[in-house]
Every structure is written in structure tokens, then in C-alpha cells.
Image (cartoon, coloured by chain):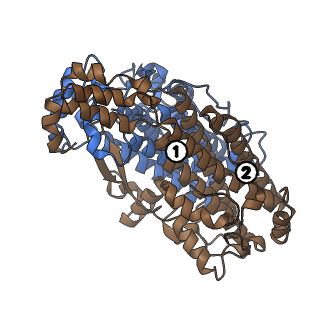
Chain colours: A brown, B blue
Amino acid sequence: MTISHQPILDGVDPEIMDTLVTRRDAIRRGASVSSTVAAGLAMGSVPVMMAALSKDAYAQAPSAILDVLQFAFILESLENEFYKAVLGTSTNSAQNAAFAGVRAQIPASAQQVFRQIQKHEQQHTDFLRGTAIPLFGGTAPSWTANDFDFTGGSGSGNGPFLQATTQLDHLLLVAQAVEDTGVRAYKGQAGRLLVNGDDRADVALESALRIHSVEARHAAKIRRLRRSMNMDDTTLRFSGYVMGGGVAAAGAGNIANPPAGAVAALGLIYGGEDNTVHTVFNGTAAVNLDAATLSGLDVIGDANARRQAAMMAFDEPLSKEQVVAIVRGFIRSDSGHALP
Amino acid sequence: MAKHTQDSADALVVADADELMRPTTRRNFVRVMGAGGAVVLLPGVFSACSTTPGMGATGTGATAMDGGALTFDLRSDIGIFRLVHTLEQLEAAFYTAVVGSASFGTFFNAGERELFTDLRNVEIVHREFLRTALGSQAVPDVTGSINTTTLNAILSSRDGILGAARLFEHLGVSGLNGAGKYLQDARNLLIAGKFVSVEARHAAALRDLAPPSGQSANTAFAGDDIIDMNGMDVKLEAGAALDRVAATNLVRNGAVSSRNISNAPTATQGKASANFFPTTP
């Protein structure tokens, strides 16, 4: 809160607030919101009118939740079709053929990892299409394997991640990056699903959180796989954490001569992961805390060690726009789909 | 606290309409809010709310947890974060003990020691972040309530340490997954989200390192026992998570259990859903 708000607050009679700003159900469902505002206006009460307006701003309309779910469905479809192509189980023979070279290099143990991950991505798309999106009155769009270009070439089949179709190291890097993008995307959208007391929104939010942590498990496992194949690359933590930010956080040290386009994409995917300042809201004010300079961290080590730990301790979100910028290259430009 | 979008800081005025609906605090809170410009300067981020009854008030000075002195009022983000703070304290204390134990170098190889040291460091950051954020509402140091007999028994074997670590990380993941819907501010939900995926990374790494009995080494990181048919992770309501903590007997006299919840979340925050958690995560 800022000082300038104090006079307004002082002028608010709690009982009037109680009367006018309690139609939570209606507001939550995006209905008859304006009547509350109108009531405030009719009474000539600026504070109450402002209160009602602001409360409206917090309520998420079903369309906003549906938008998040549809967006999630696109990302999950991309992930699912990617792993199916890698495993050779895509319904699109061209996608299967594209990954034939690298497929032969995948150890049986890692094949099993990929199958487990793909199973989850399929379950996520099924849940979003069959349950979550219909819950909000929507229909999932139709995305097929042919809509994607897993080289990141927007349909050219010759994008910056082409090496992933022929080199195992590169394939695992892309898988890790895809999973971490998913983690960051869900994290960035969670706030749009928060509508307290709305049963449907509860389902959407809790489901999203539970999917989000599964994506983090996937990313952690792939990091550990990559570390076991590149023991000197300590950016790939055995703990599965993301350490640092930007392209360095990808742990791409084992990729020889990565294309500039891949470096740029990884820079976007891990951009800002090194943030250590986080905002908490205490009911009165938003306060920023730097996790790297808290007291009580001495046992971790010197200032650099404390900063590294602080970067690992918080996974960072991506905005929808940032995610779209990342995934755009993986969707064929002639797919017929417009990204949100 | 009411809901905020991340970019609506100017709308804080209204956020507290929800607080005003709480009969016992309604009028007082308006006065407290009127002093909002000043309370920002108080040392603890959440300390402003310590003047408000019913927000989970076990403040500074309460050190004895035995006998249910520690209470969680889950009707506010503060109360929910206090619960998370308690779990993070236990995790940090546990990993500090693991890394400092005499057998650490013999039970675990270099890569495993790196993992546990990372876990210790990150849980310490979580603990200190929440302690600072909660200010006077922070949960008192719980290390004095740890049952050293139980702790030493866990520390006496590699499997004991790995099993306890897996349980703690899964309680963290499931607790945060279950609590998100009750948080009332999107910025606080984002903090919980930043924590939970990190806890999930721990959970996956530990299961990958040491799969529970019956789980394949290649799929345990996200095995069918912890991921349901919809591809969703573990989830517990707060009371169930606390009772799982109590069952470890790591905290004396069941000082951390569901009976410490003084007020459950209200229906206007969210509705409880079915729990999903295996016997041995």
C-alpha cells in the first residue's frame, strides 16, 4: 500500500464494504460484476466504487482459465509428439524417420525413461482435452504430429536443433529444455487459475500444480542422465536443480559447436533463472526479498556459494509471451494454427 | 488477503475487503490498514498482520512446541506459509544433520554427497527466506523439538537416510500441491510454485538414486506409485501432511501434527480434494 491510499481507506466503512463487496460467487464467475461497481457509483462513494472495481480485477473469468488450459494443451501436445517421434511411435512416419538416427543411440535404460515421460505427456493431453477444457465449456484444438518441427525450424526441418535427430547428447539437451520450458510455463500461468472458492478453478489450479511438479521431475531425471554421461559438467546437478541462468544454465558444455540459433533459444529458455529476488505479499504490502543475501545462510559457504544456492532454490516462471517466443520455431508455419 | 494479479499493486486497497469480512477483525483491520505506509518498514514482511487476531498467532517468544503450542491458522496466506516454514525447518535440520554426520563420507559417493549438500543448501535458503518473510509470524526454531533418538536411528544407515529424505521431499511436493488453491494472493502462489518444482526435483533425484522397493530404477523418478492415471503428482491436504510428519516420530511428542491446525481453510478459499500419496514414496 502506498501513502496515497490511506485517506481512502480511512473513509471506508467496513459494514458498507461488507454489504457491497460480498457477492463473491457472482464476481468469481464473471457475472453481474458491474452491478457492484454501479452500486458504489450510485452511492457516490469513491472508495466503495474503487474497491468494487479492484475486486473485479482480481476475479478470473472462466475465459481466462480456458485460455490457460488451451495454452497448456498446445505445450503438452508438443511434448507428447516430440517423445513419440523420438521413440518411433508417432502416427506420422516422417517424424519417426527423422529421429531414426539418434534412436539407435539411446540406451535401453534411457528408452524406458522416455517412455515413462511420454506416457505422462499423453495423460496430460488426455486430461486437458477430456476433462479440464470441457469443464470450462471449451473444446481442445486439434494438434497432430505434422503440426510440429522438432528441429525448431518452423517447418523447414532444418532448424537449430537438427543435431538432436542424430546425436544423443543433443537430444537429451532438447528434452531437458522442453521439460524446463514446461515447468516455467505452468508456473507463469498458475496465478491466472487462482479463484478462491470456485470449485472448477480449484480443479484447474490443483491439476496444473500437480502436472507442473511432474514436469520438474522429468527435467531433473534428464539432468541426472546427462550428468552421468558428462561427469565433469557440474552445471548438471545430481540434485536436478537449475543452476544459474541463461544459456549457461542449460549445461550445454558437451555440445560441440552448437548452432547460434540453439544458443539463442537456450538463452530464452533459461533466461532469468538466475533471479534471486522474490516478491511476497503480506496482506498489506508487496515486499521484495533477495534470497542470496538473507541472514542465516553462513553454513552454505561464501557469498558466491550462497548466491548459487539461492539461484537453485527458486525455479522461475516464464510469461505466456516468453513461452510463445520459445515454442514458435517448433510449430510449422503452415500448420494452420495461430499461437495465442 | 484477497487475490491480486502480479501487476495490480495499486489495487491493494481493496484486497483487504476479504479481511474485513472476518467479523472479529473487521473494524480493527481497517485501522491497521490505515497505518499501512508505516508497517512496510517493520522488519518482518508479514509482521503487520501480527496485530490482527486470528492469523495464526504464535509469535516471537513461543519456543515450546510440545503440547500443541504451535498453531497454524490456514485461513490466511501467512498461516499456510507458517506451515511450509515448519516443514522447511525440519528438512533443513535433517539435511544439515546428514551432511554433518560421521558416516556421510562412507555412506555416500562424491555425486551423492553433491546431491545432499545441494539439498541442505537449498532447504536452508527456503527456511531463511520464509523466516525473513514471516518476520514476527515466523515459526520458532523447531530443532529443539527434534527427537534425537529417531534422528540418530535414521542417520545410522544409508537406506534410513534415503528413505527419510524421500519422504520429506514428497511431503513437501504434496503439501504445496494441496495448499496452492487456498492461497489468496497470486504473488504468494508464485512463491509456492517456485518452491514446489524445486522440491519435485529433489524428490525425483532421490528416487532415481534410490528407488523404493518394487520400483524400476529407470522410472522411479516419476513412478506409477507417485504419478496417477492423469499424469499428476502427489498431493496432500495440510492435516494429512502434518500427520505424516508426526508418524515419522522425528519431532517429539507429536508436536507437529494435524492437531496444530487451529483453523482449516474456509470454503471461500477453496475446497479440499482427495489425497494422493503412497505408503512409501
The quarter of the image holding the C terminus of chain A is: bottom right
- Judging by the rendered image, the residue that carries numbered circle 2 is A117
Image: B16 above or below A285: above
Question: In terms of depth relative to the viewer, which is nearer, A29 or A3?
Answer: A29
Instruction: Tell me which amino acid carries mark 2.
Output: Ile
Farthest-out residue, top:
B23
Chain identity of mark 1:
B
Q: Position of residue A190 (x, y in %)?
A: 50, 43
Element type where label 2 sits in the image: helix
Q: Position of residue B43 (x, y in %)?
A: 22, 44
Instruction: Tell me which amino acid carries mark 1.
Output: Val
Q: Position of residue A89 (x, y in %)?
A: 85, 56
The residue that appears at 55% across and 74% down in the rendered structure is A264
Where, by quadrant of the figure, is residue A30 drawn? top left
Q: Position of residue A320 (x, y in %)?
A: 51, 55
- Judging by the rendered image, the residue that carries numbered circle 1 is B196
Left or right: A77, with B165 as reference point: right
Left or right: A313, with A176 as reference point: left
Image: A161 above or below A37: below
What numbered label is drawn on residue B157?
Answer: none
The residue that appears at 36% across and 58% down in the rendered structure is A292
Left or right: A76, with B141 as reference point: right
Chain identity of mark 2:
A
